[in-house]
Amino acid sequence: MQTTRFSPAEHAQLRMLPGVGEGLVRRLERCGIASLAELARLDTVALTARLALANCSHCWETSPKARRLAEAVIGLAQRHAAAI
């Protein structure tokens, strides 16, 4: 199974966010999320639930740090969508 990937430009934008590393970008891609447009359509609860399910780790649903990261990537995606 081939994983869909963020474009290099969107990947770089995500990585510029504090706390967002290669691991989180890979987790998003493993969840089938590979564009800022897709992220912009999600809310924090939906994203953290999706990450928790895909990674077999409920810390994504309960951790304040995970929630902040989810809010940050969704916020970036929504700003990007508004600018297009």
Image (spheres, rainbow, N blue to C red):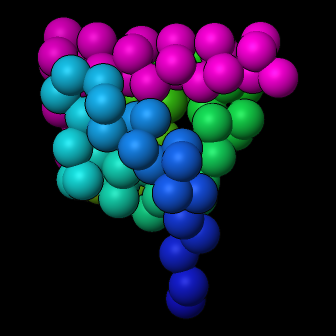
Question: In the image, is residue 70 above or below residue 30?
Answer: above
Q: Quadrant of the N terminus?
A: bottom right
Viewport quadrant of the C terminus: top right
Q: Which residues are magenta?
A: 57-84
The image quadrant of residue 36 is top right
Q: Nearer the viewer, residue 62 or 68?
A: 68
Residue 44 x/y as whole percent: 48, 16
69 and 44: which is toward the camera: 69
In front of the other: 40 or 59:
40
Is residue 71 on the magenta stretch?
Answer: yes
The secondary structure that most of the magenta stretch takes on is helix
24 to the left or right of 74: left
Question: Image point 30% across, 24% down: which residue?
Answer: 17
The residue most toward the right is: 84
Q: Quadrant of residue 48?
A: top left
Give the number of callouts: 0
Locate residue 72, reporting x and y percent. Answer: 39, 16
x and y percentages locating residue 35 in the rendered image? 64, 46
Drawn side of residue 33 relative to residue 73, left or right: right
Relative to 42, residue 35 above or below? below
Q: Residue 53: x percent and y percent?
A: 39, 48
Q: Is residue 78 visible?
A: yes
- Residue 61 magenta-drawn? yes
Q: Residue at x 44, y 24 (%)?
A: 73
Q: Is residue 33 visible?
A: no
